[in-house]
Image (cartoon, rainbow, N blue to C red):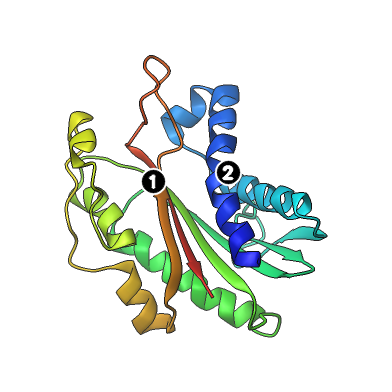
Amino acid sequence: MLLDILIQSVNEFQSDCMALCNKHYPAIHNQGMTEHHLGKAFSRRLERTLVEFGHTCESHPVELHIAAELPHHFRVSSDIGTVWILTHHMVSANKASKDKIFRDITLWKNEYGYAIQPTDILLLLADHWMTRDSKSRELLYWWTGKLPDEMDAYNAQGIALHKSDSKLLKSLESIHDFTPCYIKYTHPLKRSKDQQLVRRYIQLYTVLQ
């Protein structure tokens, strides 16, 4: 049940992002969202969905870094379980940025291992503005393990996607012994002039149980 509600929240979050974009245009179009705003916005979406299904819940920051930073990891606790949300705004898609995801999982395990229950769910949430850099063009494949079917739509916006030598799935299995049960990517922003998806901006989701 908790997994179903989380997946529904992922789908509904796209409408939330469009509303945020319209409210804060052109800031989000130019920069995306900060890690703090991205994580906070999604945790609120998950809370609303849980309440709509009649569940009680509350969210709290997950502190993994120095206290001076605005929190960008969160946990949403409910009467049917807890979702831990680790958020990353990937300015770059290089190895250092990817390694930070795995380091944060390790920190989360070390800091909150006593509180993690077998029924809990971990959500990896990331966003990225694709650039001409080759690692940026490989990120979608690295995250999902495949290239999208609509390659022509990416090419039409000047985005030439490529395969990568590694995959998130394989790294999660080898480093943390995790196997994702749900992987998704979205392009939640649209161009104001023609309502076409802004494919350079991508949000990435991986759910681990």
* Res 168 quadrant in image: bottom left
One can see residue 193 in this view:
yes
Q: Position of residue 27 (x, y in %)?
A: 50, 27
**For the residue carrying disc 2, how many other residues have a C-alpha within 10 Å: few (<14), some (14-19), or many (20+)?**
some
Query: Quadrant of residue 153 in the image?
Result: top left
Circles 2 and 1 in contact, beta carbons < 8 Å: no
Q: Report the disc number at residue 12.
A: 2
The one nearer the camera, 174 or 190, is: 190
Residue 24 position within the rendered picture, expressed as x and y whole percent measured from the top left: 57, 25
Mark 2 and mark 1: Cα distance apart in space: 19 Å
The answer to whether residue 56 is left or right of residue 124 is right
Rendered position, 51 above or below 29:
below
Structural crowding at the residue carrying mark 1, measured as other residues with C-alpha within 10 Å and reported as few (<14), some (14–19) or many (≥20): many
Residue 200: percent from the left, percent from the top? 32, 37
**Mark with earlier residue (2, 1):** 2
Frontmost of labels 2 and 1 is 2
Tag 1: amino acid: His
Q: At x 23% / y 53%, what residue is drawn?
A: 147
Q: Going 44% across and 34% down the picture, which residue do you hit?
A: 31
The three-letter amino acid code for the residue at tag 2 is Glu
Numbered disc 1: secondary structure: strand
Image location (x, y in percent) of residue 111: 63, 78
Image: 21 above or below 78? above
Residue at point 17% right, 66% down? 165
Left or right of 140 on screen, residue 13: right
Disc ID at residue 186: none
Q: Please identify the quadrant where the C terminus is shown.
A: bottom right
User: Which mark, by number, is residue 128?
Assistant: 1
Q: Where the N terminus falls, by quadrant? A: bottom right
